[in-house]
Amino acid sequence: MLRVELPDVPGSLGALATALGEAGADIEAIEIVEHRSDGVAVDDVLLELPQTVMPDALITACHALEGVYVHWISRYTAGANLSMDLEAVEAFTGEPAQAIARLVEVIPATFRTDWALAVRRGEDGATVLAETSAAPKLVPDCDEWLSVEEAGLLPEVEAWDSTVLAGSPAKTRGGTTFFIAVGRHGGPEFLPSEIARLGHMVSLAASVQTDGL
């Protein structure tokens, strides 16, 4: 998966696709992540490479185009769907008693993160409500999450080296305040549009969640 910045003008996406194809990549899907007011777009490109082509060749091909910059390139789950917001909403609205847990399960695929977890304040600090299998063990720094008032980037946690963090707080209809945190090992940074999506989805899950947390 390639995250790339390019001029938001007609022909730019076609030129990018041509350059990647000439470098040996087989493009499976392209998603526009963000349109910026300065005339720049950020796209995610899901592609397949033959074993004879190195990822560096894609970066070189992109940077040969005027105004194109690669933010991040990494292996990505084969066959993943780049349009999963509706599927995510269906997952947690279908089980109101487990809405938060279902949202946590689908966040990694929906937002391209390595892990997700939901916490609330317990007697000894933050306690886990739900987590994905790759989520790290909570450390004292995580207690600060529960004082965050809106979706946004989170400070680095020293124990989780090179992990980019974001999260969002919410309150269920029953009054339970919780926080969902997500992490990417080594990036890319979370864009404002991604944080806004995460905040909306967490709030929706909170409105669906029935009592019982």
Image (spheres, rainbow, N blue to C red):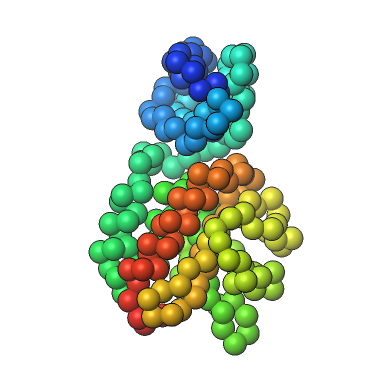
Residue 40 rendering spot, x and y as whole percentages: 56, 26
Image quadrant for the C terminus?
Answer: bottom left
Rendered location of residue 17, percent (x, y): 45, 18
Q: How many marks?
A: 0
Vertical relation: 95 (above or below) 6: below
Q: From the viewer's perspective, tell me whether residue 61 is left or right of residue 133.
A: right
- Of all residues, the one furthest to the front in this rendering is 37
Nearer to me, 171 or 125 = 171
Residue positioned 55% across, 37% down in the render: 74
Q: Position of residue 80 (x, y in %)?
A: 38, 41
Q: Residue at x 45, y 15 (%)?
A: 10
> Is residue 90 visible to the viewer in this orientation of the structure?
yes
Residue 77 sits in quarter: top left
Q: Is residue 157 left or right of residue 36?
A: right
Q: Is residue 134 visible?
A: no
Q: Which residue of the protein is positioned furthest toward the bottom in this rendering?
A: 123
Q: Position of residue 170 (x, y in %)?
A: 48, 68
Q: Is residue 4 left or right of residue 90?
A: right
Nearest the viewer among 92 and 47 is: 92
For residue 178, above or below residue 196: below
At x 56%, y 83%, the residue is 122
The residue under the point 41% across, 49% down is: 110
